[in-house]
Amino acid sequence: MSLGFFIIRRLLLTIPLLIGVTLISFVLAHIVPADPITANLGQRAISDPTIVAAFRAQWGLDQPLPAQYAVYLRNLLSGNLGVSIHSRRPVLDDLRAYAPATIELATTATLLGVSLGLLLGVLAAVGRGKLIDSVARFVSLIGLSAPVFWLALIALAVFYVRLRVVPGPGRLDATIKAPPTISGLLILDSLFAGRWDALRNAVGHLILPSLVLGSYSMGTITRITRAGMIDSLAQDYVRTARSKGLRERIVWFRHAFRNALIPVVTVIGLTYGTLLSGAVLTETIFAWPGIGRYAYLASTTLDFPAIMGVSLFLSLIFILINLVVDVLYYLVDPRLRAR
Amino acid sequence: MSSTILLTPASAPANRFGSLWRRMQRRWGLLISALILLFWAVGALIGPSVLAYQPLQQNINDSLQTPGAAHIWGADKLGRDIFTRVIDGGRITLPAGLIAVLAAALIGITVGALAGYMGGVWDEGLMRLTDVFLAFPTVILAMAVAAALGPSVLNAVVTIAIVAWPNYARVTRGLVLNVKSSEFVEAARAIGAPHWRILLRTILPNCSSALIVLATLDFGNAILLFAGLSFLGLGPAPETPEWGRMIADGIEYADQWWVSGFPGAAIFSLLMALNFVGDGLRDWLDPRSQVR
């Protein structure tokens, strides 16, 4: 199967999946006992039947369900995700405004988590049974077991309140003017504008939340890397490499590590997707204006256009990440191509 | 998740309990984990009848008191004893997590077993449904369901079951497909056993060990999600002594670390123990993974 055909087939399979996602959020939005009217109109407005009727008509709440869903799908095809009941702006605009903060956070978190995890995993496997192994496994267990919102509180209390080594919550200090928005990612935008003060400040603000958010991936990646390395260090080709007289370090990295990477790639893809959608708790504590906060506000106000928009956006990213992982697999592992 | 479960359904070793005990003695980590689990379970069971304070008992004179003789883990803003509240929190979190995992397992195993056993259209339909739920961002789904149903313990449990079942479906399907072609299944079919009997009595018991490991590790995830939902205010009512809720109460008190420190430590210790036990179970049930 050629790579192009493979990608097209996978992309086509994405369509029913996304329709399914819209259907779930739509059904969810309409079978629940809660009423968006009480969540969005004030006390006095609810007691006025004309206002309630106008609200229903404005959001299409007065039409039968299949009709509402059909309208939603038709709008979706033209790139219209609807208007958020809460912010009264098009959901697409909201997503554009909130997504970059989360993407910046989740990407940094994944980078930190993956590099620390790979390092700890390799060290643990190479020094298996020794002190370094126990330390690495313990650190990874902490990452897997500590509730992220608790870690976040501890990190803020220690590094911000006590030691004052990092700036506090938010993406930038209030005293620093934000660089002009191009990508929405503050690091890139500061670079584009040559604003070194903003860059330094933005990076400072990113460190703590991304370490906290990345702790779980660190834990997972350490485990998978350690297991993969131990597996591949026991393989025949490693013995061959050693018996050729190659230096131990070359055996580890050139021979064992590359083969141990294959399962790690899958996990990296999965955790990146999880961090994007799972950042809400971290965002809450660090006052991070990201998509998790947006989804939280949307949930508590039963703002279903917004919830559906966020779900659709995140599912799409999740599916695309998985596609990229599969393509990487295809490229990395020659055995798959032969099939 | 499923990639970490590498169990092959194999026949059980002769004396499992003997080997488990020997392993426990060798591995102090497992022993400590078992003790931690026992501590929280016993605390939840008999806590209220032996503790000096009540979880909701306020004493404004003790507001934010440091851990000491009167309150060994300190007191919160309203002077409520944190040790009592944390112990009492187990009475909510442990059953909630357990029921959520059992419900998720029940749904997921049913879906996965049907898909794997029936094959064909059933398999396609059920697994595509599972895929959709897997593609749906978990936390967003959980928040939306919890917010829509309204904040309560029961609704949080329902929420967790809804987001957690697809994993069981996928794993079960794989296991069932694996076992389905075994000779003993063919033998059962040959003597004319009905489908439900083959599935329930012959196939599923042979998938049980992998599913038990999955559920153990998932119990931790359920507790984490439950605490996260209550932290966001989408769980039990505000005054309830629930761990995530208590951590949220402590946000304003960075200097009074004990207010959120101890409830967090409770979740942390419980999860660590569950992870340890889950890994131990996996090693014990699957000889292949012992090298790891």
Image (cartoon, coloured by chain):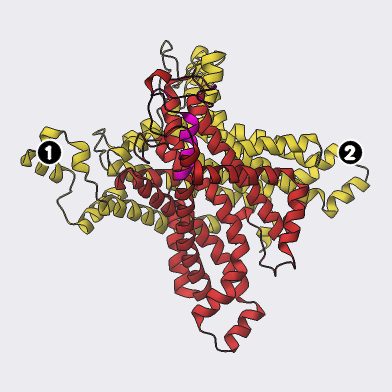
- Amino acid on which disc 2 is placed: Arg
Residue B56 seen anywhere in this rendered image of the structure:
yes
Verify whether residue B2 appears in magenta.
no
Give the residue at mark 1: A46
Residue A184 seen anywhere in this rendered image of the structure:
no
Image quadrant in which the N terminus of chain A is located: bottom right
Q: Position of residue A173 (x, y in %)?
A: 44, 14
Chain letter of disc 1? A
Q: Is mark 1 on a helix, strand or loop?
A: helix
Q: Which of marks 1 and 2 is nearer the N terminus?
A: 1
Verify whether residue B74 appears in magenta.
yes
- Amino acid on which disc 1 is placed: Ile
Give the residue at mark 2: A247
Compared with A219, B211 (above or below) is below
Span highlighted in magenta in the image:
B63-91
Q: Where is residue A90 in the image (x, y as percent from the top left)?
A: 27, 37
Name the residue nearer the viewer: B166 or A180. Answer: B166
Q: Could you say which chain is coloured yellow in the image? A: A
In the displayed structure image, the side of residue A24 where residue A37 appears, left or right: left
In the displayed structure image, the side of residue B278 where residue A103 appears, left or right: left
Q: What element carries label 2?
A: loop
In the displayed structure image, the side of residue B2 where residue A93 appears, left or right: left
Q: Could you say which chain is coloured red in the image? A: B
Image quadrant in which the C terminus of chain A is located: bottom right
Chain letter of disc 2? A
The residue at the far bottom in this view is B191
Q: Where is residue B199 in the image (x, y as percent from the top left)?
A: 53, 75
